[in-house]
Amino acid sequence: MALQDIFKFRELPESETSKPFLEHLEDLRWTIVKMAITLVAAMIICFAFRSTLVRVMQAPLHDIDPQIGALRALGITDSLVVSFHLAFYAGIVLSFPLLLYFLAEFVLPALTAVEKRFLLPAIFVSFALFLLGVLVCYFWLLPKTILFFFRDTQSLGWAPTWTVQQY
């Protein structure tokens, strides 16, 4: 078997679907625009639920020590800046399936039948692993990290008083 036979699946026949380079750039531009609109829409939705997001993010801190009370906002814009950060990250999580879909929609025409057959399972596995990573970080890594810094601060004889921007 020659090396040329191994990579034969990469050789696509010329057809009516082949496009000039600038049309590919136009498709890429529209893909990026659709992804940006999706992310902004998800961020707006998440921003509307920012008080819920704040409670969810502070839950591991209150589980470690309920006596901590509220986080301190030292800057004038801390509430808005932190809300935007939370909305951005939650928006990524919320829009991730659609972002993967738009990316696949752009790449799909260039793939062979064999590659297309593996794309949908790969998207589902990617999303599942992404969610698994988010959940592991939230339920396992974040509480352990907070506990480590909480105990380290107390071991130095200091009272742990954290700001919302640092948390």
Image: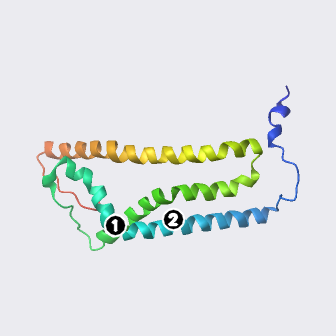
Could you tell me which residue is drawn at 44 percent across and 70 percent down? 44
Q: Quadrant of the N terminus?
A: top right
The mark found on residue 50 in the picture is: 1
Residue 87 visible within the image: yes
Could you tell me which residue is drawn at 79 percent across and 61 percent down? 21
Q: Is residue 129 left or right of residue 77?
A: right
Q: Quadrant of the C terminus?
A: bottom left
Q: Is residue 148 left or right of residue 122?
A: left
Upstream in sequence: badge 1 or badge 2: 2
Cα distance between the residues tagged 1 and 2: 16 Å
Q: Residues within 10 Å of mark 1 (few under 14, many from 20)?
A: some
Among the 4 quarters of the image, the one containing residue 52: bottom left
Between 145 and 140, the one nearer to me in the picture = 140
User: Which scheme is used to colour this image of the protein?
Assistant: rainbow
Q: Position of residue 94 (x, y in %)?
A: 47, 59
Could you tell me which residue is drawn at 67 percent across and 42 percent down? 118
Could you tell me which residue is drawn at 83 percent across and 38 percent down? 8
Task: Provide the residue designation for mark 2.
Answer: 39
Q: Position of residue 83 (x, y in %)?
A: 35, 67
What's the residue type where badge 1 is placed?
A: Arg
